[in-house]
Structures are given as C-alpha cells and as structure tokens.
Image (spheres, rainbow, N blue to C red):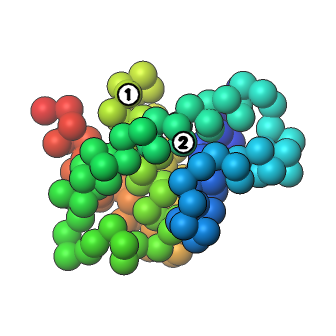
Amino acid sequence: MDRRQARVLAMQTLCHCDVQAGNGLGPLDELAKEAEAKSGTKRYASDLCSHYLESSRFTDQQITQNLKEWTLERLNPVDRNVLRIATVELEQRKIPVNVVLDEAIEIAREYGSPESAKFVNGVLDAIKRSLLE
C-alpha cells in the first residue's frame, strides 16, 4: 500500500466533491484507476474519505477553529482538502503525528499554490495542539 498515493487520491476525491457539490466516493474509482493504484492504496483512500464524510462537521470545525482570518470556504480546494485528510488522520491517531504533518505539507507543496505548504503547516500545527492536548 502506498499511503502517500492514498492521501493524494483522497484529497483529489474530496476536491472533486467540492467542485461538483457532491458527497460520495464516486470519483475515487476513476482516480484510482487512472493512477493505477493498488487495492490497499485505494482502500486506505476510501477509508480516509469515508471517515471525513461521516465526521465532516467535527473535522471542519477543528480546521475552522484554527484558521486565522480565513474561512474554510475561502481556502483553495487543495489546501482545504489536504487539511481535511490530515485532520482525519490526526483524529484517528493511528499514524505518528509527525508523519501526518510531513505528508500533508509535501502534498500541499506538490499540488497547491506556492504558499500552500507554509499555510498547511501552520494550521495543522495548531490543530495538532488542540486535538492532542
């Protein structure tokens, strides 16, 4: 299983849901097929998306409480959904915190704007403190 690829697939699926105003996992099948993702990778991406969709109110609240002078709606879709996926992983407490943060920052750097990595790092650091204290 490739957890990085799973996180990217989950982020892309949630971005698609944002743009299409959907809330299902339909886009994941096509995205996983295009990426030639193995079944374990697709399953982990699906688990991340499902957990977010089941607890979206709590997850989005965690993010919103840690945004300074921003609203969740104003964030670009990549930043918003990288934060969502990382927050889900922080909530689950199955992956080491530093791994979650490093992965999110790298994905934001690769897929987001030039400022995305720095922004995601700052918000996730605050979320980490609020969730784990």
Q: Which mark is residue 32?
A: none
Q: Residue 91, position in %: x, y? A: 33, 33
Element marked by disc 1: helix
- Asked whether residue 126 appears in the rendered view, the answer is yes
Q: Which mark is residue 49?
A: 2
Q: Earlier in the sequence, mark 2 or mark 1?
A: 2
Q: CA gap, disc 2 to disc 1? A: 13 Å
In depth, the one of 12 and 97 nearer the eye is 12
Q: Report the residue marked by disc 1.
A: 92
Dot in front, 2 or 1:
2
Residue at image point 13% right, 33% down? 133
Q: Residue 31, position in %: x, y? A: 77, 51
Q: Is residue 13 left or right of residue 106?
A: right
Amino acid type for the residue under numbered disc 2: Cys
Q: Residue 95, position in %: x, y? A: 44, 26
Q: Is residue 76 left or right of residue 69?
A: right
Residue at image point 52% right, 37% down? 50
Location of residue 8 with respect to 98 vertically, above or below: below
Task: Decide: few, some or many residues near mark 2? Use Cα within 10 Å; few <14, some 14-19, many ≥20.
Answer: many
Task: Decide: few, some or many residues near mark 1? Use Cα within 10 Å; few <14, some 14-19, many ≥20.
Answer: few
Amino acid type for the residue under numbered disc 1: Gln
Location of residue 101 with respect to 38 vertically, above or below: below
- Asked whether residue 101 appears in the rendered view, the answer is no
Q: Residue 9, position in %: x, y? A: 66, 48
| Residue 88 occupies quadrant | top left
